Amino acid sequence: MAKPLFDPQQLPVDAIAGEPPLPAAMLAPDALRAHFARAPYFEGEPGDAAFVRRPDPTPAAVLIPLVRRAEGLAVLLTRRTAHLSAHAGQISFPGGRTEDFDASPVDTALRETEEEVGLHRRYIEVLGVLPDYLTGTGFRVTPVAGLVTPPFELNPDANEVDEVFEVPLAFLMDGAHHQRLSFELPEGGRRAFYAMPYGDYFIWGATAGMLRNLFHFLRA
């Protein structure tokens, strides 16, 4: 397994995005349904398109699981195991690469979610999709947003998932929590990315970028 070029948690914060938090009313299930149905245009984060060396990135999809809790929606996330070949040990959405038998990115996201964390699709109401996000590791990821209704049981795949946890959606939909960081590339130049630290969890890279796009989308 290739070692990362840097430890993102040791980098200085270049800037805070700083946009005001989204009002609680905008983060309610009915408001989200209406917003995804309207599907407004928005300017999203570019992802790592400039750093993708392959002309044909591997298609993949992830689920942004929005769990209905009494105190408000929460985003279900995973910490990947340390031995994986891509994004080892990082905070991620459940998901993975598209297989030939998948009917759509939605099908990929739901199948991978069940395989990774044991969350069956019968608990998930798909709201819609966000624009594809290119990762520096060569994936073209389609984020699929879905409401998840408890009670449900999880059965994480111990080979892929080290931990499953939740973060309040309201925390993530606040620009004051969106840090901008960067690092020097070995070949010259700088590469920038977002991070959204929450307690002991350091959410960064593609996952933070896709959350940032959800933020842009809901503000549009």
Image (spheres, rainbow, N blue to C red):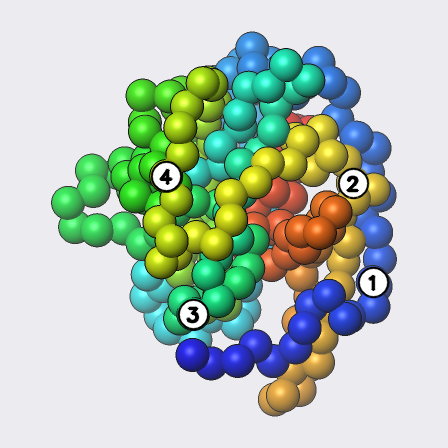
Q: Position of residue 208 (x, y in %)?
A: 62, 50
**In-front residue for pair 145/200:** 200
Per the image, the residue denoted by label 3 is 83
Q: Nearer the viewer, mark 1 or mark 3?
A: 3
Whole-angstrom CA distance, mark 4 to mark 1, is: 36 Å
- Tell me if residue 14 can be seen: yes
Q: Residue at x 83, y 62 (%)?
A: 13
Q: Position of residue 58 (x, y in %)?
A: 32, 61
Whole-angstrom CA distance, mark 3 to mark 2, is: 33 Å
Q: Which element is circle 2 on?
A: helix
| Residue 175: mark | 2
- Tell me if residue 62 can be seen: no
Please tell me which of labels 1 and 2 falls first in the chain: 1
Q: Nearer the viewer, mark 4 or mark 3?
A: 4
| Residue 213: mark | none
Q: Position of residue 151 (x, y in %)?
A: 45, 18
Please tell me which of labels 4 and 1 falls first in the chain: 1
Whole-angstrom CA distance, mark 4 to mark 3, is: 19 Å
Per the image, the residue denoted by label 4 is 155
Q: Which element is circle 1 on?
A: loop
| Residue 13: mark | 1
Query: How crowded is the residue under tag 4: few (<14 C-alpha within 10 Å), some, or many (20+)?
Result: few
